[in-house]
Image: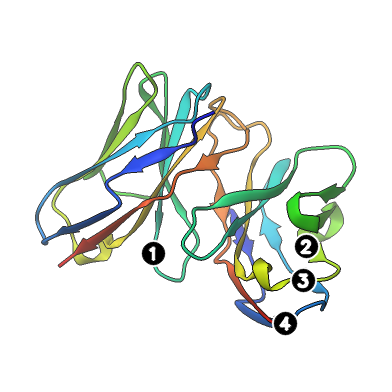
C-alpha cells in the first residue's frame, strides 16, 4: 500500500510569486485535505477536496486555491506569496469526506524571501 | 470557538520515566479524538484515535489515552518512555458527524527523552 506522497520536498520563492504544490493520496482514499504548519505551531486546516470539489475551507484567503483530479491526487496553489506563507504544507488523505482518520504526507517546506 | 489546548510545550524525561501529556478541547458537539506523533525528520503519524466505545484506547508503541468527556480531555500516557520516543506530539479533534473532515490541532508538545 502506497502512502501519501508530496512534491517538491523544499521550495524557495520570492514575495509576489505563485507556487503549486502536489499531493498523491494513499491507495483507496478519495479525499484530500491540506494544512499549513508554521514553525512551532500545530497544522492549520486550509481546505479539503472530495469528488474534485472543494468541500470545506479554513480561515485562509482566496489566493489559496486547489484542485483535485480524477485519480484523487491534488494540487495546492498559492498566488501573490507573502513572507508569512513560509511554512510546512501538509497533505492528508482519508477514505471519506466526513469524520475519518487522516494520513499525512511528508510535507513541502516553502520558504518565501 | 473550536480549539485544542496542549498544556505542556516542552517535556524532558529520563528513560523509564512515566509520561502523561495533557490535551483539552473546546467543541460544541460529538468529537473524534486523535494523537499524532512526528519523529525527527519524519512525517506526522497516527499514534491512536478515539471514535466511540471504551474511553481508554491503546495505540502503537505502548501508548494509551483516556477520553474523559466531562473534562473535555484526552490525555496521552505511557508507563515507561524510551529514548526513541523523542518526538513532537500533537492532539487533534474533528467533528464526529461533520460533512468536512477538518482536523483541529493543538500546538504540540516536544518530548525529549534522555538516555
Query: Disc 3 or 2, which lies upstream in sequence?
Result: 2
Question: What separation in Å lies between label 4 and label 2 (alpha carbons)?
Answer: 17 Å
Whether residues under marks 4 and 2 lie with C-beta atoms below 8 angstroms apart, the answer is: no
Task: Give coordinates of residue B15: x percent, y percent.
Answer: 76, 79
**B19 over A34 or under it: above or below:** below
- Pick the residue in front: B24 or A7: A7
Q: Are marks 3 and 2 on the same chain?
A: yes
Residue topped by disc 3: B81
Q: Are marks 1 and 3 on the same chain?
A: no
Question: What separation in Å lies between label 1 and label 3 (alpha carbons)?
Answer: 28 Å
Question: What separation in Å lies between label 4 and label 3 (alpha carbons)?
Answer: 8 Å
Residue topped by disc 1: A38
The answer to whether residue B5 of the structure is visible from this angle is yes
Structural crowding at the residue carrying mark 1, measured as other residues with C-alpha within 10 Å and reported as few (<14), some (14–19) or many (≥20): some
Query: Disc 4 or 2, which lies upstream in sequence?
Result: 4
Q: Are marks 4 and 3 on the same chain?
A: yes
- The numbered dot on residue A62 is none
Residue A22: quadrant of the picture: top left
Q: Is residue A25 left or right of residue B61?
A: left
Q: Secondary structure at mark 1?
A: loop
Q: Secondary structure at mark 2?
A: strand
**A61 over A14 or under it: above or below:** above
Structural crowding at the residue carrying mark 4, measured as other residues with C-alpha within 10 Å and reported as few (<14), some (14–19) or many (≥20): some
Q: Secondary structure at mark 4?
A: strand
Residue topped by disc 2: B75
Q: Residue furthest front?
A: B115
Task: Give coordinates of residue A10: x percent, y percent.
Answer: 26, 56
Front: mark 1 or 3: 3
Amino acid at each position: 500500500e502506497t502512502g501519501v506522497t508530496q512534491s517538491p520536498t523544499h521550495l524557495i520563492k520570492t514575495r509576489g510569486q505563485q507556487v503549486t504544490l502536489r499531493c498523491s493520496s494513499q491507495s483507496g482514499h478519495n479525499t484530500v485535505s491540506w494544512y499549513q504548519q508554521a514553525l512551532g505551531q500545530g497544522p492549520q486546516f486550509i481546505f479539503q477536496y472530495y469528488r474534485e470539489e472543494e468541500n470545506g475551507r479554513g480561515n485562509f484567503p482566496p489566493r489559496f486555491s486547489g484542485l483535485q483530479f480524477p485519480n484523487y491526487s491534488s494540487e495546492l496553489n498559492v498566488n501573490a506569496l507573502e513572507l508569512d506563507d513560509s511554512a510546512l504544507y501538509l497533505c492528508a488523505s482519508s477514505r471519506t469526506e466526513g469524520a475519518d482518520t487522516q494520513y499525512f504526507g511528508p510535507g513541502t517546506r516553502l520558504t518565501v524571501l | 470557538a473550536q480549539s485544542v489546548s496542549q498544556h505542556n510545550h516542552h517535556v524532558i524525561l529520563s528513560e523509564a520515566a512515566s509520561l502523561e501529556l495533557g490535551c483539552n478541547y473546546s467543541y460544541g458537539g460529538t468529537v473524534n479524538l486523535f494523537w499524532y506523533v512526528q519523529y525527527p525528520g519524519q512525517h506526522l503519524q497516527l499514534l491512536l484515535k478515539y471514535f466511540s466505545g471504551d474511553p481508554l484506547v491503546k495505540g502503537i508503541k505502548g501508548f494509551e489515552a483516556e477520553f474523559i468527556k466531562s473534562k473535555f480531555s484526552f490525555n496521552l500516557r505511557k508507563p515507561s518512555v524510551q529514548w526513541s520516543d523523542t518526538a513532537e506530539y500533537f492532539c487533534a479533534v474533528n467533528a464526529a458527524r461533520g460533512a468536512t473532515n477538518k482536523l483541529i490541532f493543538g500546538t504540540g508538545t516536544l518530548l525529549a527523552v534522555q538516555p
